[in-house]
Image (spheres, grey):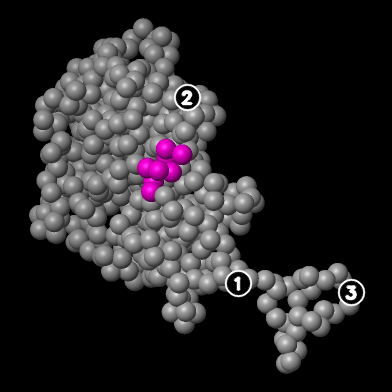
Amino acid sequence: MSSTGGRGKGGPKDTGRRNAQGRERNRGPRTYTGQAPSQRTRRADPARLVAFEVLRAVASEDAYANLVLPARIRHHGLDRRDAGFATELTYGALRGQGTYDAILARCVDRPLDQLDPAILDALRIGAHQLLAMRVPAHAALDQTVGLARAVIGAGPSALINAVLRKVSAHSLDEWLDTLVAGETDQTRIAALRHAHPEWIVRAMRQSLVAHGRPATEIDSLLEADNAAPVVNLVALPGLGNLDEALEAGAAPGELVEGSALSSGGDLGRLASVREGTTRVQDVGSQLVARAMAGLRLDGGADGGGTESWLDLCAGPGGKAALLAALASERGATLLANEPAPHRAKLVGQALAAVPRSAWQVRTGDGRDLGTEQPERFDRVLADVPCSGLGALRRRPESRWRRSPKDLADLGPLQRELLASAIAAVRPGGVVAYVTCSPHPAETTAVVADALRKRDDLELLDAGAALDAVSLTGDLGAGYESTAQLWPHIHGTDAMFLALIRKKA
């Protein structure tokens, strides 16, 4: 309490509230925690501190959690167990942010946007522990308040303690029932229950229908978005193997050859990962790259023998590395194009494990390649910039950053890049149009526009191409010649694939 509290500025001293030593007596009933001051946590638990630092970077610097988290784990020297806890806490708090904010709004006596952002992040971390993790309530409260006391201050820690005690009074299911009580809008209900913005719920429902799936799958899709994704590994063909990863506990992949599923941990400890011959890559990305590379083409390669491949939007280099390895096996060459110099450098690093004769990196606008190098390439991957709605489980913060405006803004760029890819492919060659989004505005609508503008194009069966390179042979991803993978059906990111052949 302020030393001037309780009396007007410049007013008479209230000596009746001071003791014999001249110290001011407490001016009201005090409340006590269940612990003596000497027993209360006054330091930040390292795992929770990592989660807090990542949330702060995401909120204040527009950082991506998957890039910041590993660095903070290494900085604080977390062991495997604590690293796993920090990862679950970080991603869980980010995924559930919308729902947790709705709950916190019922427990705070002011609008949340009036709270200091650091306090709000601490509350989200506490709410996730209390409502969705196997952390005893007393430990979640004590450790979160200790974190706040250490990194924010004693004053805010009292507020955080009071708010989280209110949160802990009910289970997550009870809170959800309270939040949706009286709601009749099914989109609003799904948004609260599954922690997605309402516009994304509508977009995903529309996407399901556009790709031939029932709208009733929306809850399953949103639940899959909230499940912690398994780390997917790929051994570059002819270069890497998964023996070390399998010995470390990874399981063989069930959808595509040369893949494995890892429970996580520090994959940088694996020699093959450090060498770049084994890489982290979603199995959906592996499938679409292999589908393009595996197609039988008409007319032969350049009339001779050596095929030329193009990755039009290669950064940061995941698919490019897999394509370059496949090209190297077949005596083909890959041009990896990336407009941003710093991302082009990442592409070069990703390709370093592949024989240098098989690839080169170009730094430039992919929209110019169709004009500069017309009808040169046999296979072109146009994995265009998109909203990323298909990878929300891996980038949970994206759902709160994106807006419907992003779809409108990206549309012209996607169409221009696809037009350039079509111009760059030779007659008889194939363009693979790929997005990590199922939204029809970024998928089928873009492809339909391209087909309407030219009469020398035809769609190949993308679902059959995916089946041909899958271990199951029956993914069931095809619909009207295009293909869409789904988290809740295939366990992959929601990758879209259209294969466009330029007629010979």
The tag earlier along the polypeptide, 3 or 2, is 3
Which is more toward the observer, 246 or 80? 80
Q: Is residue 423 left or right of residue 105?
A: left
Circle 1 crowding by C-alpha within 10 Å: few under 14, some 14–19, many from 20: few
Split into 4 quadrants, where in the image is the C terminus?
top left
| Residue found 45% across the figure and 36% down from its top | 192
What residue is disc 1 on? 30
The x, y position of residue 104, in whole percent, is 52, 49
Circle 2 crowding by C-alpha within 10 Å: few under 14, some 14–19, many from 20: few
Looking at numbered disc 2 in the image, what kind of residue is underneath it?
A: Thr
Secondary structure of the residue carrying tag 1 is loop
Q: CA distance from mark 2 to mark 1?
A: 44 Å
| Residue found 21% across the figure and 29% down from its top | 291
Which is more toward the observer, 438 or 128? 128
Compared to 407, does 48 lie above or below? below
Secondary structure of the residue carrying tag 3 is loop
The x, y position of residue 239, in whole percent, is 15, 49
| Residue found 79% across the figure and 73% down from its top | 4
What residue is disc 3 on? 11
Compared to 82, does 425 lie above or below? above
Q: Which residues are magenta?
A: 171-178
| Residue found 46% across the figure and 42% down from its top | 99
The x, y position of residue 74, in whole percent, is 35, 67
Q: Quadrant of residue 67?
A: bottom left
Secondary structure of the residue carrying tag 2 is loop
Looking at numbered disc 3 in the image, what kind of residue is underneath it?
A: Gly
Looking at numbered disc 1 in the image, what kind of residue is underneath it?
A: Arg
What residue is disc 2 on? 184
